[in-house]
Structures are given as C-alpha cells and as structure tokens.
C-alpha cells in the first residue's frame, strides 16, 4: 500500500461552454468513472467514524413534521393546464435561452409540467 506524501491538487472541472460542440445541457458535474482522489491527511488521521449521539438529524423535529397538516389542495390539481399561444412562446423562449428546450423534430417525446400541472400543448407524447 503506497502512502500519499504530497497533497493532491483538487480542482473543479469547469463546465463546457454552450457554444462548444461537446456541450450538453444535462452534463452538470463529474461523470461516473472520473477519478476521485482521497483527501490529504487520510493516512495521518484515519477514516472519519461516526460518534454516538452525533447524528445530523438528532435535533430534527420529527413530531412537527408528522403533525403538520398537509391536506390543502391546490387549485386545478389533477387537471391539465391550458396555455394560450403567447404564454407558450414565452415559456419556449425562456427554455431555449436556458438551453433546456429540444425542438420537435429533434426529440421523440417531451412532458412539460407548469406548476405541477401537465401542459399537453407544449408536450410531445408517443
């Protein structure tokens, strides 16, 4: 077993610019299989171990979470949202500007939800 004797330079991988041919709106961080180096000092201090009564959730209010009233129903829940042409265009322009809209001829399926309601006029179902 080799020991780490010098700190490994930990650098953040910068995102790919949107004008690059390799840009993908779904690539946000390191890809699976990327090398993750251990932190310097691991061989000196050892692995971190859990300590009794040091859990992060120890002081969490479970009774408050369970006792909360979640019975409020939102207006229109369970129905499709109807969007007029102007609203649809504003959503599409916003999505295109953010790089998350795929044109109809380039995708075979798209589900769009607005405020938790399905928008069939902007979706593509097969």
Image (tube, grey):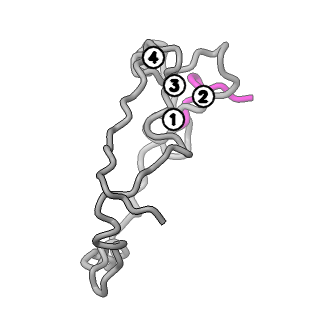
* Mark positioned earlier in the residue sequence (3 or 1): 3
Q: Do the residues labelled 2 and 1 touch (CB within 8 Å)?
A: no
Eyeballing the image, is 116 above or below 120? below
Q: Do the residues labelled 3 and 4 touch (CB within 8 Å)?
A: no
Mark 3 = which residue? 24
Find the magenta span and give its range: 118-126
Gap in Å between the C-alphas at discs 2 and 3? 25 Å
Q: Is residue 61 left or right of residue 103?
A: left
**Residue 114 shown left or right of residue 33 in the figure:** left
Query: Element at badge 1?
Result: strand
Q: Distance between the residues labelled 3 and 4?
A: 13 Å
| Residue at x-position 33% and y-position 70% | 68
Q: Residue 101 carries which label?
A: none
Residue 120 lies in what quarter of the image? top right
Q: Which of 118 and 20 is in front in this view?
A: 20
Which residue has dot 4 on it? Answer: 96
Name the residue beneath numbered marker 1: 113
**Disc 4 on helix, strand or loop?**
helix
Which residue is the site of mark 2?
A: 120
Q: Which of marks 3 and 4 is nearer the N terminus?
A: 3
Determine crowd level at label 2: few under 14, some 14-19, many 20+ residues with C-alpha closer than 10 A.
some
């Amino acid at each position: 077993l080799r020991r780490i004797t010098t700190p490994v330079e930990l650098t953040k991988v910068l995102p790919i610019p949107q004008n690059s041919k390799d840009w993908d709106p779904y690539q946000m961080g390191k890809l699976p299989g990327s090398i993750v180096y251990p932190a310097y000092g691991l061989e000196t201090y050892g692995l971190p171990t859990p300590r009794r009564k040091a859990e992060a959730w120890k002081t969490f209010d479970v009774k408050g979470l369970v006792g909360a009233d979640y019975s409020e129903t939102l207006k229109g829940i369970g129905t499709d949202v109807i969007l007029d042409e102007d609203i649809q265009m504003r959503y599409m322009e916003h999505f295109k500007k953010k790089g998350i809209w795929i044109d109809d001829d380039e995708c075979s399926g798209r589900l769009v939800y607005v405020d938790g309601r399905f928008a069939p006029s902007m979706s593509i179902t097969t």
